[in-house]
Amino acid sequence: MGWLGPAEIEALRLSLRVSFWATVVSLPLGIFVAYALARWRFPGRQVLNGVVHLPLILPPVVTGYLLLLTFNVQAPVGRVLADLGVVVAFRWTGAALAAGIMAFPLMVRAIRLSIEAVDPKLEQAGATLGASQPFVFVTVTLPMILPGIIAGAILAFAKAMGEFGATITFVSNIPGQTQTLPSAVYAFLQVPGGESAAMRLVIISIVIAMGALLLSEYVGRRAAARVAGT
């Protein structure tokens, strides 16, 4: 990457770190929520579905502001976390939190569609043999929805890489600490002569986004073919 400057490399490295942890940490919850929405019927199900998809509807700046109100060290939640030694506001961990929340709806939707494509009779057959629901999920459902999980994780990672509004509102734009690819592009465009550096980061962002979309599409087709038994 000799054509990238130190600040650009640092922004790319931080974006990869933020997106990786945003995806990994939110994936177990995403699988659980997707399964609950696909298979369970319970009071408040539509409310949960609305909350999950709310980040897609709200302006990202609003989401970031709500995170700032919730997790700053003066707020009740932020104060409790600070007492435990966990501070996320204006830290890279806060960027990962904001990116994970913004990417969560895409992850859940991809996994949910994969679960809904699995014939419930296959799961019921396992249950009739005396297997517990967690065992049926691990041995029957999980192998069949694995391509969907991978596709959801890829989409979430790509979305986290491109997150800007919520992140910059929640953790600001601190070089080397919270300055990810999108915020670095924004910063470079604010200074004279920064257009070339911004363009290099734009090219990297496009390559990553297109690669993620193509990979997700490929995995999605594999998932459909696997469920259909071809």
Image (spheres, helix red, strand yellow):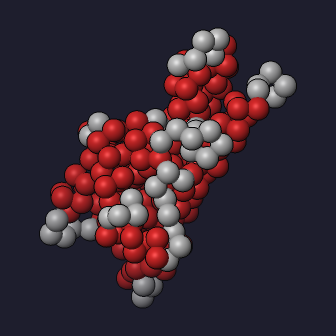
Residue displayed at 42% across by 47% down: 170
Q: Looking at the picture, does residue 51 appear above or below residue 128?
A: above
Residue 197: quarter of image? top right
Q: Evaluate whether residue 107 shows in this view.
A: no
Percent x, y of residue 24: 57, 58
- Name the residue nearer the viewer: 86 or 41: 86
Residue 8: quarter of image? top right
The furthest residue to the bottom: 130
Q: Looking at the picture, does residue 207 appear above or below residue 173?
A: above
- Name the residue nearer the viewer: 170 or 37: 170
The furthest residue to the front: 74
Percent x, y of residue 33: 36, 62
Residue displayed at 65% across by 43% down: 176
Lateral position of residue 15 relative to residue 37, left or right: right
Percent x, y of residue 189: 55, 18
Quarter the N terminus occupies = top right
The furthest residue to the left: 43
- Name the residue nearer the viewer: 55 or 67: 67
Residue displayed at 22% across by 52% down: 50
Residue displayed at 50% across by 64% down: 87
Q: Evaluate whether residue 25 shows in this view.
A: yes
- Name the residue nearer the viewer: 200 or 138: 200
Lateral position of residue 201 relative to residue 1, left or right: left
Tally the marks: 0
Q: Looking at the picture, does residue 163 appear above or below residue 170?
A: above
Percent x, y of residue 140: 50, 69
